[in-house]
């Protein structure tokens, strides 16, 4: 069965917007630049995205999916609890270093606004990501207490705040402090994961 041309146009616009944001920053990306890169008409662009904010929400959602895929890959490759915890922090900062414009959008977009930009598939993908994280934590000794929001704040929160400050001030590379932030995350989560004693 042939794919829906409208769906193809939507995907082409999102891909073009992601490419523009990566290359020149979202702040410098106009709807006209996205339209030209996607090779669609004005009518098609505004049918799918009537405003720049509407497109921004979808770009953030698409970028979020890529970010979550990178973190999930680290969890699946982890050989033990410490490896998983530290490498997720490292990958998180590396991804933000490599996608700074998208990272700025992530950090400046409220969770409510971000969720409003997710389509059905993205909502399912976001839910699956947090289910993967929950399952991984339980497999490594987490009892469910403290709750997931607290675990994530201990795990990623300091790296997130460091990234926010660096991106706001353009001070240094985000991955300059990865070792310290990864080690801090491990110290915070280790008592909650029942890590075997032989792994210091």
Image: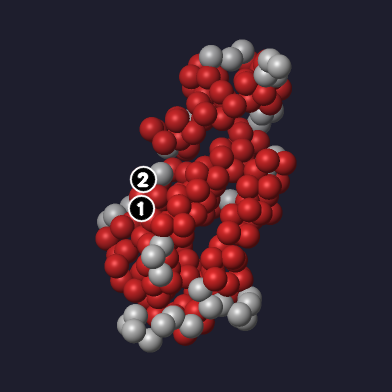
Q: How many marks?
A: 2
Residue 62 vs 177, above or below: the answer is above
Q: Quadrant of residue 179?
A: bottom left
> Which residue bears the numbered disc 1?
94
* Image x and y of residue 51, in percent: 66, 31
Of residues 128 and 117, which is closer to you in this image?
A: 128
Residue 98 disc label: 2
* Image x and y of residue 59, in percent: 56, 38
Residue at x 42% of width, y 65% of height: 84
* Image x and y of residue 116, in percent: 70, 46
Q: Are marks 2 and 1 in contact (CB under 8 Å)?
A: yes
* Image x and y of residue 113, in percent: 67, 49
Residue at x 62% of width, y 21% of height: 8
Residue 140 appears left or right of 44: left
Mark 2 to mark 1 CA distance (whole Å): 6 Å
Residue 106 vs 181, above or below: the answer is above
Residue 8 appears left or right of 177: right
Label 2, residues with CA under 10 Å away: few <14, some 14-19, many ≥20: few
Q: Secondary structure at mark 2?
A: helix
Residue at x 72% of width, y 41% of height: 120
Q: Secondary structure at mark 1?
A: helix
Residue 14 vs 104, above or below: the answer is above
Colour scheme used in the picture? secondary structure
Label 1, residues with CA under 10 Å away: few <14, some 14-19, many ≥20: some
Residue 131 disc label: none
Residue at x 56% of width, y 23% of height: 12
Residue 65 appears left or right of 198: right
Q: Considering the image in quadrants, where does the N terminus appear?
A: top right
Residue 9 vs 79, above or below: the answer is above
């Amino acid at each position: 069965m042939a794919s829906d041309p409208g769906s193809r146009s939507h995907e082409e616009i999102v891909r073009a917007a992601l490419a523009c944001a990566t290359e020149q920053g979202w702040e410098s990306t106009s709807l006209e630049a996205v339209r030209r890169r996607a090779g669609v008409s004005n009518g098609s662009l505004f049918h799918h995205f009537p405003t720049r904010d509407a497109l921004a929400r979808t770009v953030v959602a698409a970028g979020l999916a890529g970010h979550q895929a990178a973190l999930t890959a680290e969890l699946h490759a982890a050989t033990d609890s410490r490896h998983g915890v530290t490498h997720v922090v490292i990958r998180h900062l590396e991804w933000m270093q490599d996608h700074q414009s998208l990272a700025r959008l992530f950090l400046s977009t409220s969770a409510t606004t971000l969720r409003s930009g997710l389509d059905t598939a993205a909502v399912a993908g976001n839910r699956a990501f947090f289910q993967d994280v929950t399952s991984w934590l339980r497999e490594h000794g987490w009892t469910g207490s403290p709750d997931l929001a607290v675990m994530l704040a201990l795990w990623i929160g300091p790296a997130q705040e460091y990234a926010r400050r660096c991106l706001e001030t353009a001070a240094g590379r985000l991955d300059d402090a990865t070792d310290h932030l990864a080690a801090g995350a491990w110290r915070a989560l280790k008592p909650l994961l029942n890590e075997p004693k032989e792994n210091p």
